[in-house]
């Protein structure tokens, strides 16, 4: 199925990332958002051109419309887009699936042209400025066709997923919601609970923050409004997982209390939890980490002095290495930090050598 023109409604993180990926594959992309600033920024980033909405019949019909707005607005947007005939087929990217589909049916949307979907890729940042063309590379992208869905609509969504470089996973909406409660939604709340302990942590504690706490809490930095919408749209499955997590945590705390009181036998229960954690962790398929899995990461020690990063980038420039992403690990109060430069694998060795020759510490 050929996708020549795609309309993206909601040019935030996910909509703009999809738009950038599709543009790279030669698809014409039209952009719409209720916030004119979000469309402008997406356009300036090269994600496409502004959509000129018209009254029905729409003068130009896209092959596919991607609805990339918060879950609660998906069904009403779908209804309005179908009313004006904005596209031949429609999908959305909301993090919950059963409720938007149910609401779309209630509103009388045409379910034949609509196949709901959800990319399992994202960031803790919102808006078009956080978008990345490679966000979906190698990531799972769920699609949940209903019985009413036209096979052509499914083919259009499969093609979009392929063009974005993701791996399609077909699953029912109910199974999807139960699954993401375990692998995405409950972990998010758990991360928030851990991060909330830092709100009144002492400066000494924060000064000692290493990579562990950063890894466990990264997603807790996400937009609370968006996450309230996601969690409330999948409330029962998430509550069930959190109850199990809460039981494990309560048991761990009680074992530690017993150990503190000198009960040597209490270690067994805690060991069991830690071992179950290893088993669960090892079952996650593929590599962990951000979307830069196609890049090599060159770590460079940098001093806490003005101009260090500029000098580092100067070297990259001199040796003609494009930095695809940069991440700074810097504990407050310490004189050194680590810059992690994501670069194409075929350039990592030459960059490492060039940096070492110029006196940079590359561990
Ligand atoms: N953030 C993630 O990691 C992630 C990952 C996968 C899927 N999702 C899903 O993608 C969707 C978008 O999330 P995001 O992270 O891109 O959010 P975002 O806040 O970056 O972008 C949402 C955009 O939708 C716009 N919008 C809101 N209501 C609208 C409406 N009625 N019509 C038109 N535009 C409207 C907002 O102005 C904003 O620009 C959500 O449904 C979310 O559940 C998010
Ligand atoms: O990595 C992140 O920052 C995410 O927010 C990603 C994540 C996830 O839990 O995997 C979060 C919610 C989305 O619905 C899909 C992906």
Image (spheres, rainbow, N blue to C red):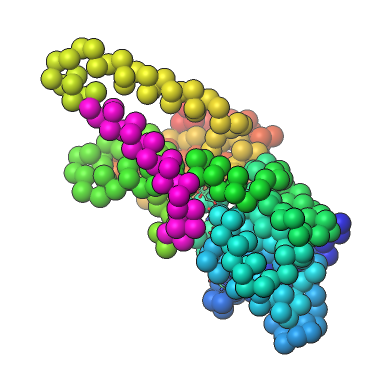
Magenta part, dominant SS? helix
Q: Residue 237: x percent and y percent?
A: 48, 46
What's the magenta region? 228-254
Q: Residue at x 71, y 45 (%)?
A: 170
Compare residues 195 and 55 and report the one nearer the observer: 55
Q: Is residue 323 magenta?
A: no
Q: Residue at x 60, y 35 (%)?
A: 296
Q: Is residue 90 above or below residue 327?
A: below
Q: Can the viewer see residue 101 in this picture? A: yes
* Residue 134 appears left or right of 150: left
Residue drawn at point x = 86 percent, y = 57 percent: 1
Task: Decide whether residue 252 is among the magenta residues.
Answer: yes
Query: From the viewer's perspective, is 14 left or right of 271?
Result: right
- Residue 346 position in % (x across, y down): 69, 34
89 sits left or right of 92 in the view? right
Q: For this view, does 101 lie left or right of residue 282?
A: right
Q: Quadrant of residue 222?
A: bottom left
Q: Residue at x 56, y 60 (%)?
A: 99
């Amino acid at each position: 199925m050929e996708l020549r023109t795609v309309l993206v409604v909601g040019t935030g993180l996910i909509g703009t990332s999809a738009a950038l990926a599709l543009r790279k594959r030669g698809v014409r992309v039209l952009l719409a958002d209720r916030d004119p600033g979000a469309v402008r920024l997406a356009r300036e980033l090269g994600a496409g051109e502004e959509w000129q909405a018209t009254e029905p019949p729409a003068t130009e019909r896209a092959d596919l419309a991607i609805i990339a707005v918060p879950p609660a607005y998906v069904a009403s947007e779908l209804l309005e887009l179908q009313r004006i005939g904005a596209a031949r087929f429609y999908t959305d990217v909301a993090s919950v699936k059963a409720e938007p589909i149910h609401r779309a049916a209630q509103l009388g949307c045409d379910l034949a042209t609509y196949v709901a979907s959800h990319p399992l890729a994202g960031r803790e940042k919102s808006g078009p400025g956080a978008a990345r063309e490679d966000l979906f590379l190698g990531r799972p992208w769920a699609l949940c066709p209903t019985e009413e869905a036209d096979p052509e609509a499914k083919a259009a969504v499969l093609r979009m997923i392929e063009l974005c470089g993701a791996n399609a996973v077909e699953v029912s909406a109910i199974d999807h919601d139960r699954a993401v409660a375990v692998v995405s939604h409950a972990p998010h709340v758990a991360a928030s609970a851990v991060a909330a302990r830092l709100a009144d942590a002492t400066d000494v504690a924060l000064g000692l923050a290493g990579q562990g706490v950063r890894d466990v809490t990264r997603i807790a930095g996400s937009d609370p409004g968006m996450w309230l919408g996601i969690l409330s749209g999948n409330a029962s499955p998430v509550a069930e997982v959190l109850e199990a997590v809460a039981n494990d945590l309560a048991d761990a705390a009680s074992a530690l209390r017993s150990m503190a009181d000198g009960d040597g036998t209490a270690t067994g229960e805690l060991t069991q939890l830690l071992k179950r954690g290893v088993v669960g962790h090892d079952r996650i398929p593929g590599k962990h980490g951000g979307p830069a899995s196609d890049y090599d990461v060159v770590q460079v020690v940098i001093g806490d002095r003005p101009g260090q990063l500029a000098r580092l980038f100067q070297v990259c420039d001199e040796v003609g290495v494009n930095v695809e992403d940069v991440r700074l690990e810097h504990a407050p109060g310490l004189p050194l930090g680590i810059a992690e430069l994501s670069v194409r694998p075929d350039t990592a060795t030459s960059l490492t050598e060039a940096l070492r020759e110029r006196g940079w510490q590359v561990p």
